[in-house]
Image: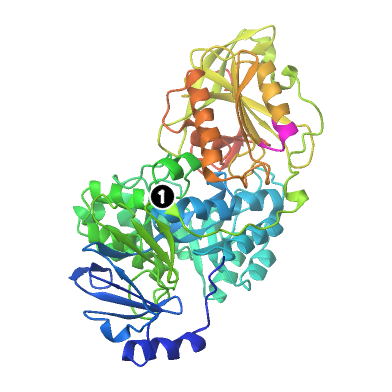
Amino acid sequence: METPIKSWSEVAPVLVAVAAGRQAADSVIRGGKLVNVQSREILDGWQVAISEGRFAYVGPDASHCIGPDTEVTEAGGRYLIPGLCDGHMHIESGMLTPAEFAAAVIPHGTTTMFTDPHEIANVLGLRGVRLMHDEALMQPVNIFTQMPSCAPSAPGLEKTGYEISPDDVAEAMTWPGIIGLGEMMNFPGVINGDPKMLAEIAATQDAGKTVGGHYASPDRGIPFHAYVAGGPADDHEGTAEADAIARARQGMRSMLRLGSAWYDVESQITAVTEKGLDPRNFILCTDDCHSGTLVNDGHMNRVVRHAIACGCDPLIALQMATVNTATHFGLERELGSIAPGRRADLILTSDLHNLPIELVIARGVTVAKDGEITVECPHLDWPEDARATVHLGKALAATHFEVPAPDGRNRVTARVIGVVENQAPTEALTAELPVIDCVVEGENGVAQIALVERHRATGEVVNGFVSGFGYEGRMAIASTVAHDSHHMIVVGTDRAMMAAAANRLGEVGGGVTVWKDGAEIALVELPIAGLMSDSPARDVAAKAQRMVEAMAECGCTLNNAYMQHSLLALVVIPSLRISDLGLVDVDRFQLTDLFEERS
């Protein structure tokens, strides 16, 4: 059940009384080593007293807080560390609802998440955000919601199911669980003074809340400075040490991410470990983690372990995943450290380097032990219209995926989206492709890609080409997870199977399907907004693992290739993407032709 957070007027008298020894604590933890992220030191033998879901006493001896009904936990020499915080993430990327996502990450020691539900905003608008927000507040851990800023992410380059307006942002700022504005992906809009983008930022700033950043350009010159001047307070899109340094020098928090497919910690953490920058301005996050990663590898504990393996001092890495994050969002007095008055979120671990998560406490309640969750994560009753969001308008056929050759040529020079392993950006490539019966065909590793409109039943299909997946033989993969517009992305080498895959997702209400040699070989159903399942994480992860295996059976060798697939329509990250309006040159932020003109 939900552990309610009481008001300060209710809890302060109790905390003071417990710390003074006038009242017994609910629980006491002793016999451990306290990791103090405020002072960056390990305090051997320090004890913790908890009451009303908060830390009342933190010091060398809590015996004066123990009464006949106080629950005493012996730490057995283990470390007490704060519950871990994820500074930037999207729950929908786990293919799970907030409840199931929480259930998956609690055993890994994540007790606080700052989430941006802009995926569902593109499908269901403000109402979808409210549904995510409401289920988040039901959980036994802290899930704060950032109001999405960019739906569509790039106006004029794509159309979405719904559009977010400044009025929507202003309304959301009054909701109890809204912590700020989600990543401001439309960085050209900010740089060029777009009134809508600046109005959204202003509504957030006026509410005294944090503006999330997303500057995906490698240009750290005047455009970057103009973007920072607009108000974004953090950025997770850095991929190089110079990116991390540039952001910190401008007063931003540099968020270093390790997701299922994003490996941007190692290349940037040297700003701290080698260049010696103040680590207070650095935050660890995941951004996007699919269910398989959550079940098999971990969540924020995985990121902290990785940062340590990259040479970061364990105490600094822990600061980057606790107090730094809380401070950034204005919650340093509320969470992020084991200190009086903070929410009693902590972990017991026997090893600060490998970080086994042996006991997790959230708001004073044991929520996981030895890798198993010990509490319930309540579910929202998701309405039927949130489960019926794939509207194709008509059954698709192989002919919808044909690319007619221009001017009767027998060969063409086509622009090709080039997938880069473990990186969000793509390459803008070209390839000489053959024409057979007036239709352009892929060859030599170049597959077809299509974006199928699925919000308004227009029946529109935009076709193009992609390379880097390594697909062979006759295959197709379709997904209604298509950041950020979340139409449907279909990639394949056989047009009939591309049509079959798209129609299949129309039947099941969304998800991911893989086809090989005329038959479906994997299916992950995602009935909620075509993005999420309310099934347990392990069940979803098992189907997702089968999906990964199926992609490999089709010839794909990329690490986490599905994440790359799902981002092919993300028209705010360079260099070449596809949208429902056509092929997008993100470097110039404009639509471009599929074929190069003859010289």
Predominant SS of the magenta segment: helix
Residue on which disc 1 sits: 299
In this view, the residue farthest toward the front is 68
Which is more toward the observer, 80 or 529?
80
Q: Is residue 123 magenta?
A: no
42 and 581: which is toward the camera: 42
Quadrant in which the N terminus is drawn: bottom right
Would you say residue 241 is visible in this rendering? no
Q: Which residues are magenta?
A: 505-510
User: Image quarter for residue 260?
Assistant: top left
Q: Tag 1: Cα neighbours inside 10 Å, few (<14), some, or many (≥20)?
A: many
Horizontal and vertical percent position of residue 519: 64, 17
Image x and y of residue 489, in percent: 62, 32
Does residue 553 appear to the left or right of 138 in the view shown?
Answer: left
Q: In the displayed structure, would residue 24 be above or below residue 185? A: below
User: In which quarter of the view is residue 63 placed?
Assistant: bottom left
Q: Secondary structure at mark 1?
A: loop
- Residue placed at 23% from the left, 54% from the top? 351
Indicate left or right for 444 with 342 as reference.
Answer: right
Inspect the image, locate mark 1, and give the three-letter code of the amino acid beneath it: His
In the picture as drawn, the residue positioned furthest to the right comes out as: 394
